[in-house]
Image (cartoon, helix red, strand yellow):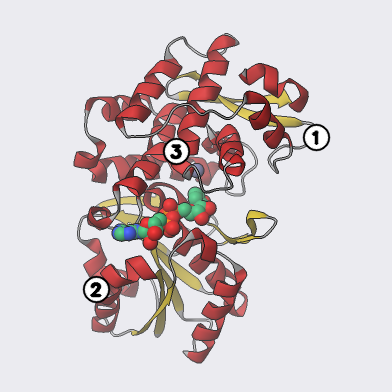
């Protein structure tokens, strides 16, 4: 078993091993004295893994119940959280009891937020089952929901007490979401780890996914530990995201998946960095080829003006400037504050 220990204000471990989900009960027993466990999952993941997790918890002596919501980002909203609160209260959960998030990033964000707020905060455990959730959203303690005015606008920082990653769960994830998660995996190689980038170039990531997940989680752990509440270094994780987020918005979060948009954003911003003489030549071409290898798009028909305009109204933009994440070279990144008025020219 691989283990990544996270030393945030409440320290916890991330455990990675094939088949680990079957040991959920004993793993949780070793970190929690809860009597009741509410497993929160979505309709897709619950149908495949719900019973395994509940059985394992019951075998370890927990009083376990399963709350299922309809899968999809459109349900990542307060109505669903409200239904969770009622379910947990009807299940007579106390402050000592536990929430388990079983699913992708949507499930993790919502179950984490419900745990952060139910009775002013109870413990929770993440069992991420999508590639994106395993390498990104389950680490770092950000939880929350979308509101009509924007994505992830309401939330809380709440660290899990344990993260259980079973790479075997990826066997049932669709190719679309596997590829989507690879956008973030490639990002880690770009910003922090040339060796990872080269490994992705020379191998089929899916054949060595356990090692890849471990590497990505370790990188995110390092960054989050140094910058728990997102002020400095954590911004580097936004590589490809500033332009990517604009693209997602242009298509109303329906045309491009998050990982696809990030892929286009990474290539665009690195091309701009090369043009400005800030990034080693040919970096963007290598990122492009790698993204294509994992079925991710690398360009888009939206105009540079449109992208820059949306970016200017984005929440990450403040005081008339935006913090662009650029590469010095593959594996090395830095932040370049850029005036919004100069953004279009910079990326054109
Ligand atoms: N908290 C953070 O730091 C953070 C970071 C990045 C993204 N996010 C959030 O994560 C969400 C996206 O996560 P996501 O892509 O995992 O979305 P998701 O949770 O909707 O999962 C994607 C799809 O895959 C299905 N699925 C998940 N695991 C499966 C499995 N093992 N087998 C079969 N089907 C499976 C889900 O049912 C869903 O249909 C967004 O809401 C985003 O805001 C949060
Ligand atoms: Zn992302």
Q: Earlier in the sequence, mark 1 or mark 3?
A: 3
Q: Position of residue 235 (x, y in %)?
A: 59, 37
Q: Is residue 43 above or below residue 34?
A: above
The answer for how far apart the CA atoms under marks 1 and 2 are is 50 Å
Query: Is 184 on the left-hand or right-hand side of 176?
Result: right
- Near mark 3 (Cα within 10 A), the count class, few <14, some 14-19 or many ≥20, is many
Q: Give the quadrant of the C terminus.
A: top right
Q: Which residue is situated farthest in the right direction here?
A: 319
Q: Earlier in the sequence, mark 3 or mark 2?
A: 2
Determine which of the numbered discs, if any, sits on residue 81 in the image: none
Q: Quadrant of ligand 1?
A: bottom left
Circle 1/circle 2 CB separation < 8 Å: no
The answer for how far apart the CA atoms under marks 3 and 2 are is 32 Å
Residue hosting label 1: 319
Q: Nearer the viewer, residue 252 or 85?
A: 252
Q: Position of residue 94 (x, y in %)?
A: 52, 86
Residue 138 showing in the rendered view = no
Residue hosting label 3: 260
Q: Position of residue 219 (x, y in %)?
A: 42, 39
Q: Quadrant of residue 102?
A: bottom left
Q: Identify the residue at image location x=30%, y=73%.
A: 50
- Near mark 1 (Cα within 10 A), the count class, few <14, some 14-19 or many ≥20, is few
Q: Identify the residue at image location x=22%, y=54%.
A: 171
Q: Quadrant of residue 190?
A: top left
Residue hosting label 2: 52
């Amino acid at each position: 078993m691989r283990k990544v220990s996270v030393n945030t204000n409440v320290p916890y471990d991330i455990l990675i091993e094939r088949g680990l989900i079957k040991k959920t009960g004993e793993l949780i027993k070793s970190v929690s004295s809860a009597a009741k466990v509410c497993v929160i999952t979505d309709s897709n993941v619950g149908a495949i893994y719900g019973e395994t997790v509940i059985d394992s918890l019951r075998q370890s002596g927990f009083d376990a119940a399963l709350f299922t919501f309809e899968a999809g980002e459109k349900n990542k909203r307060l109505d669903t959280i409200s239904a969770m609160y009622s379910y947990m209260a009807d299940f007579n959960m106390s402050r000592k009891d536990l929430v388990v998030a079983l699913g992708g990033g949507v499930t993790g964000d919502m179950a984490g937020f419900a745990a952060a707020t139910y009775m002013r905060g109870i413990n929770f455990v993440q069992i991420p089952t999508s590639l994106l959730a395993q390498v990104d959203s389950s680490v770092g303690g950000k939880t929350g929901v979308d509101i009509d005015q924007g994505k992830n606008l309401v939330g809380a920082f709440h660290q899990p007490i344990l993260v259980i990653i079973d790479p075997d769960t990826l066997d049932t994830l669709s190719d679309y979401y596997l590829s989507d998660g690879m956008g973030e995996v490639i990002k880690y190689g770009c910003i922090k780890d040339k060796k990872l980038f080269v490994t992705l170039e020379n191998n089929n990531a899916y054949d060595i996914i356990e090692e890849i997940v471990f590497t990505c989680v370790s990188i995110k752990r390092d960054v989050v530990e140094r910058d728990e509440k997102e002020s400095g270094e954590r911004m580097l994780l936004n590589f490809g995201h500033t332009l990517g987020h604009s693209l997602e918005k242009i298509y109303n979060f329906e045309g491009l998946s998050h990982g696809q948009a990030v892929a286009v954003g990474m290539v665009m911003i690195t091309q701009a960095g090369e043009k400005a003489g800030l990034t080693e030549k040919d970096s963007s071409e290598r990122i492009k080829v790698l993204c294509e290898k994992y079925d991710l798009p690398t360009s888009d028909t939206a105009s540079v003006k449109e992208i820059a305009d949306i970016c200017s109204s984005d929440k990450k933009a403040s005081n008339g400037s935006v913090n662009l994440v650029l590469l010095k070279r593959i594996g090395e990144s830095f932040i370049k504050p850029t005036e919004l008025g100069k953004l279009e020219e910079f990326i054109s």
